[in-house]
Image: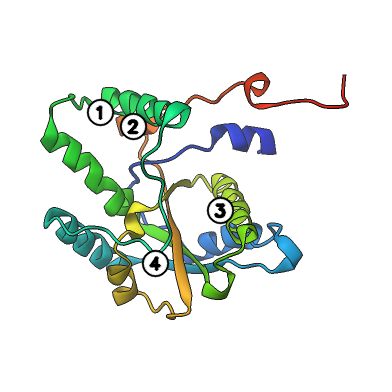
Amino acid sequence: MELKEAARQRKSIRKFKNKPVPKDVIKKVLEVAAQSPSALNTQPWEVYIVSGRPLEEIKKENIELLTAGTMPSPESQSMENLDGIYKKRQVDLAIELFKLMGIGREDNAKRFDWMQRGFRFFDAPAAIIMAFDKVLDNSANTFSDLGCFIQTLCLAALEHELGTCIHSQGVMYPQIVRKHIDIPDEKKIFIAVSIGYPDWDFPANRIESAREPIEKITRWFGLE
């Protein structure tokens, strides 16, 4: 698969088949991701793979806290209070997803069920928890480097017919994650990537999210 084809095919998968991903396949994906660039070759990424019973326990306890109304306390700041074009893009995506899923504007039960999906890692058979050392917390390069690693990981997964979803919901209750995964205190939980074989019968997996044209996001100087 060519790079441009992989970049176009990659999408957020919001439901996976109940089919385990072999450890050696995940390892191959990570070996590609580990070639990602990083500032000063710091390679700040810390990777925790979770599957089986530990992942199922995290999913279950996440939902228990969410249902009880416990406020999330993520270790890394998530996007909130968006405005302007950023809010519009978020809303446009939600409208398309809810349309595909048949979720009405006033259907609070279905909306809450949809919210739970992220806290269940979108029912993925495996998840990759990304973390970094707290000594790097004030470096903008750290977040750029982690983004490079995650993007490379998601593209590499396509070679093995795997889908991914980058999300923060699964790690919004870090106390639950740490209860089931041995993450040292000096490490900060950053984000999660659900990984597995896509369930293409799930309506939301058919979405093609819009991208702005290059002409709208680019300014040229010194080039005709």
Distance in Å between CA atoms under marks 2 and 3: 22 Å
Distance in Å between CA atoms under marks 1 and 3: 27 Å
Task: Tell me: 89 left or right of 54.
Answer: right
Residue located 51% across and 44% down the image? 161
Residue 210 percent coordinates (x, y): 49, 24
Q: Which residue is mark 3?
A: 150
Upstream in the sequence, badge 4 or badge 2? 4
Whether residues under marks 3 and 4 lie with C-beta atoms below 8 angstroms apart, the answer is: no
Q: Which residue is mark 2?
A: 204
Tell me if I can see residue 16 in this picture: yes
Q: Which residue is mark 1?
A: 101
Residue located 27% across and 22% down the image? 99
Tell me if I can see residue 18 in this picture: no
Helix, strand or loop at mark 4: strand
Q: Amino acid at mark 3?
A: Ile
Q: Nearer the viewer, residue 129 or 173?
A: 173
Viewport quadrant of the C terminus:
top right
Whether residues under marks 2 and 1 lie with C-beta atoms below 8 angstroms apart, the answer is: yes
Task: Tell me: 215 left or right of 151.
Answer: right
Helix, strand or loop at mark 3: helix
Residue 76 percent coordinates (x, y): 43, 60
Residue located 33% across and 32% down the image? 204
Q: Which residue is mark 4?
A: 50
Distance in Å between CA atoms under marks 1 and 4: 28 Å
Count of all numbered marks drawn on residues in the image: 4
Upstream in the sequence, badge 3 or badge 4? 4
Q: Amino acid at mark 2?
A: Ala
